[in-house]
Amino acid sequence: MMLMVHYEIRQRLEEREESLSPYAMRSRYAQRERPEEPCPMRTAFQRDRDRIIHSKAFRRLKHKTQVFIAPTSDHYRTRLTHTLEVSQIALSIARALNLTEDLAEAISLGHDLGHPPFGHAGEEILDELYPQGFTHAQQSLRVVQYLEKDGQGLNLTWEVRDGILKHSKPRADIFSEEGGIADTLEGQICKLADAVAYINHDIDDAIRAEIIAEDSIPMEIRRVLGTSHRERINTLVCDIINHSWAASGACDGAQRPLISMSHEISEAVNSLRSFLFNTVYLAPSMVERKEKGKRILRMLYEYYCENPDKLEPKYLPLIGEVERTVLDYISGMTDRFALQHFEDLYLP
């Protein structure tokens, strides 16, 4: 029996968005680089979400480092589980502020697609090796725009791509404008949800690895943010919602609101990030593993730059600048693929 799908489904979904905050980004106004026929059942942002989930880059996140390189325990976060936690937090905030949940979800699911193997150690060494520099945010945009589907890209909406590009944060301040400010409030939500997720789950994983203990977190930070994983997430999410309440449209205001935190909470968050850098990310055992990962990627990069004919065949038609193609190839590797490749090339 043939089933009929009526075009009114998408239209009804778009009509529901009219009840959202006046500051919400409506899917009917979304823009793509290459025009497409609308989907009969899904809005533009729902379609983007589905394309990201079904991409090869998304599937590879399950074997990419979050903090602990190639962990043997099943309970440490990977780049994929981090992405899912970011998405859950972003959805909660967007829903509370009456913004477009589908857009926040799509940006969250796509924000780390360009992250290289071995986490930020991989990002640091590729930035050092490639003359034009490397950031995972720019690479995530490149993945969805050019690399997926054998060079065709996913043709995502401009709003999702903008949020992906502008989600990253420098070490000193999560509110720094260094990485840009997303043009949509939903993109701004993803930037903060990313910080809320990794600050909390990195503490959880560091405690599991016995690098720190819960009571080693400075008392002033615990007093403000809470003394457990649950309390800290609840404090941060509630503070973002309360301090960004104008974005919900419930308040009259002449200026377009921003997604932000209160001064007290943001100071505590930046202090907690500094604590994590000093005690976890830069711990001797972590630095040693990071340096090993960097050496592996350096050797792979140098090998393929000298032997581009050894790249997988699907990459050869993409070669314009050899170093750029090698960068795309290595940054797309999972931890275990990079390790296996290194063993195949350099170990007897």
Image (cartoon, rainbow, N blue to C red):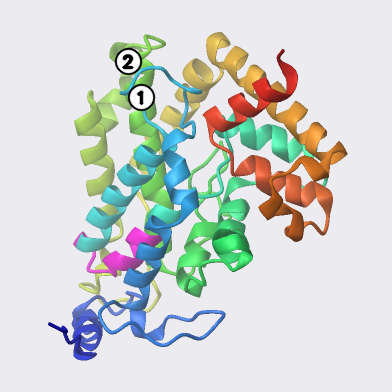
Position of residue 74 in the picture relative to residue 137 (left or right): left
Residue 281 picture location, percent across and down: 52, 22
Q: Is residue 18 magenta?
A: no
The residue most toward the front is 1
Residue receiving disc 2: 208
Dot 2, crowdedness within 10 Å: few (<14), some or many (≥20)?
A: some
Identify the residue shown where x is 69% and y is 29%: 297
Residue 223 picture location, percent across and down: 26, 25
Q: Identify residue type, mark 1.
A: Tyr
> On the image, which quarter does residue 54 sit in?
bottom left
Which of the image's four quarters has the N terminus? Answer: bottom left
Q: Where is 73 relative to 170, above or below?
A: above
Q: Where is 262 relative to 201, above or below?
A: below
Q: Identify residue type, mark 2.
A: Arg
Q: Which residues are magenta?
A: 96-107
Q: Is residue 258 visible?
A: no
